[in-house]
């Protein structure tokens, strides 16, 4: 064991070069300050947090329930959580007043990174750090087949049904995309092209689901750490799969692309480590029409077509809500105290009760209602808390601080007030 010596209040290795001591003291001081910051911020209740026991790495809306989601945890479990009820226990429960049952799916001992559902045969799939894809029966929670074939972490999974056959598509840190036959576990195709890990997968809605008489190709898009987005054609009869025009890659970002999401116009929204979320126009051969400067790594992007919002989130711990038409930032939602890893919009497809749900490394699930007035209230609540606003007996606000870290000027504040008034 290395001997240590005292420098200020820190124990440092005795043989550490003196020129490194100030840096090491600064690093430890910063680490302590960050720990203190997170501990203080973790006490907030913004976004009605549901607190779990391990980091949450992915979230997926439950297609059978407007207020339920599945989350993948670093502890190797998948949970189904009914948001109106809150955290679920470690066994199946009947949720009062919903007619739903919440479940916990166990088996893996390594972190789970991604989730897919097969509503057709009632199967849940999850990509895992152990290089495999796990599956469970949705109703009984019994583990099913494991899909083995990747040589590194599985980072993304996607379910398809082609000509009555259940198909699974996976992407891994081994830079490969694998297409599986769900029933047998057979690897149908292994697609190579990415030079670094595959981070996300999406199916082109213009090609899926194919018409019963259509024997054309379904197009899958994959996003990678190599900053490229590649397109793959899978014939509907599963006779072949290949890359579409590998000489014409989609290169809209400067570095890793974490997330892919299509909107109702079938344009592609992307989230990247370069600090932006972008809308890539199909009509313009996937050139960027809109670039949202979120800042820091952007891990997720989601679209609310009803409200006309685009939502982004990532390492800066903020959920940002943008006007889809103008690309202008409207709201910054606080609550998470570590990196946000996933977003999903839940609620009736055309109803007003729409919510954005976020999950993160802080092991919390949070949600905000996607209405202008409610979003404005959420922003104000967080600002009041940060600025030390207290209410006296007459409910008058007493403000102890006026600084606005998001830089909203008077014109923008008036515009926000008008938006809130329009929704009343």
Image: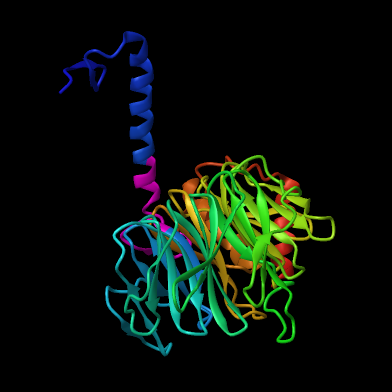
Please state which of residues 108 and 28 is positioned toward the viewer in this rendering: 108
For the rendered model, the colour scheme is: rainbow
Q: Is residue 29 above or below residue 89?
A: above
Q: As rendered, which of 373 and 23 lies closer to the eye?
A: 23
Residue 400 at x, y percent in the picture:
50, 43
Question: Tag count in the figure?
Answer: 0
Image quarter of the N terminus: top left
- Given residues 43 and 79, the one toward you in this image is 79
Residue 52 sits in which quadrant?
bottom left
Q: Main secondary structure of the magenta part?
A: loop
Q: Position of residue 401 (x, y in %)?
A: 52, 41
- Specify the farthest residue to the top: 18
- Residue 55 in magenta stretch: yes
Task: Say if residue 45 shows up in the picture.
Answer: no
Name the residue: 77% across, 55% down. Answer: 286
Dividing the image into 4 quarters, which one contains the C terminus? bottom right
Give coordinates of residue 70: x percent, y percent: 44, 71
Task: Classify residue 96 as left or right of residue 8.
Answer: right
- 337 horizontally vs 378: left or right: left
The answer to which of 321 and 406 lies nearer the viewer is: 321
Residues rendered magenta in the picture? 37-56
Say if the magenta span includes residue 258.
no
Residue furthest toward the front? 239
Image x and y of residue 31, in percent: 36, 33
**Residue found at x 61% / y 68%:** 370
- Which residue is most to the right? 283
Q: Is residue 398 above or below residue 18?
A: below
Q: Visible in this render: residue 43?
A: yes
Which residue corresponds to the image point at 30% horizontal and 81% vertical from the top-left? Answer: 92
- Position of 341 compared to 351: left or right? left
């Amino acid at each position: 064991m290395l001997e240590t010596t005292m420098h200020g209040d820190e124990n440092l290795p005795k043989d550490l070069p003196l020129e490194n001591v100030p840096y090491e003291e600064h690093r430890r001081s910063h680490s302590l300050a960050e720990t203190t910051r997170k501990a203080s911020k973790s006490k907030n209740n913004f976004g009605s947090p549901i607190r779990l026991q391990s980091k949450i790495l992915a979230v997926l809306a439950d297609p059978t329930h407007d207020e339920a989601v599945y989350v993948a945890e670093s502890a190797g479990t998948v949970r189904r959580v009914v948001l109106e009820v809150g955290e679920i226990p470690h066994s199946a429960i009947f949720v009062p007043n919903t007619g739903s049952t919440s479940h916990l799916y166990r088996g893996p001992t390594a972190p789970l990174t991604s989730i897919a559902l097969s509503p057709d045969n009632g199967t849940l799939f999850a990509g895992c750090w152990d290089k495999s894809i796990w599956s469970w029966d949705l109703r009984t929670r019994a583990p099913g087949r494991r899909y083995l074939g990747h040589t590194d972490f599985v980072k993304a999974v996607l379910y398809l049904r082609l000509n009555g056959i259940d198909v699974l598509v996976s992407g891994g840190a081994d830079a490969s995309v694998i297409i599986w036959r769900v029933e047998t576990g057979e690897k149908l195709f292994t697609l190579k092209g990415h030079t670094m890990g595959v981070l996300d997968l999406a199916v082109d809605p213009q090609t899926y689901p194919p018409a019963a008489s259509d024997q054309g190709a379904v197009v899958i898009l994959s996003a990678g750490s190599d900053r490229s987005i590649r397109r793959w054609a899978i014939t509907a009869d599963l006779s072949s799969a290949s890359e579409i025009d590998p000489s014409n890659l989609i290169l809209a970002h400067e570095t890793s692309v974490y997330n892919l999401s299509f909107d109702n116009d079938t344009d592609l929204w992307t989230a990247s480590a370069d600090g932006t979320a972008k809308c890539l126009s199909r009509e313009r051969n996937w050139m960027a029409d809109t670039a949202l400067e979120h800042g820091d790594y952007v891990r997720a992007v989601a679209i609310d077509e009803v409200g006309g919002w685009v939502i982004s989130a990532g390492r800066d711990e903020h959920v940002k809500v943008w006007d889809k038409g103008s690309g202008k930032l409207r709201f910054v939602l606080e609550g998470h105290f570590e990196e946000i890893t996933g977003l999903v919009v839940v609620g009736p497809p055309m109803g007003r009760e729409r919510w954005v749900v976020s999950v993160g490394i802080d092991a919390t699930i949070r949600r905000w209602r996607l209405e202008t007035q409610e979003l404005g209230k959420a922003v104000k609540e967080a600002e009041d808390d940060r600025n030390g606003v207290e209410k006296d007996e007459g409910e008058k606000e007493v403000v102890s601080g006026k600084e606005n870290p998001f830089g909203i000027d008077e014109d923008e504040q008036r515009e926000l007030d008008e938006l809130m008034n329009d929704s009343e």
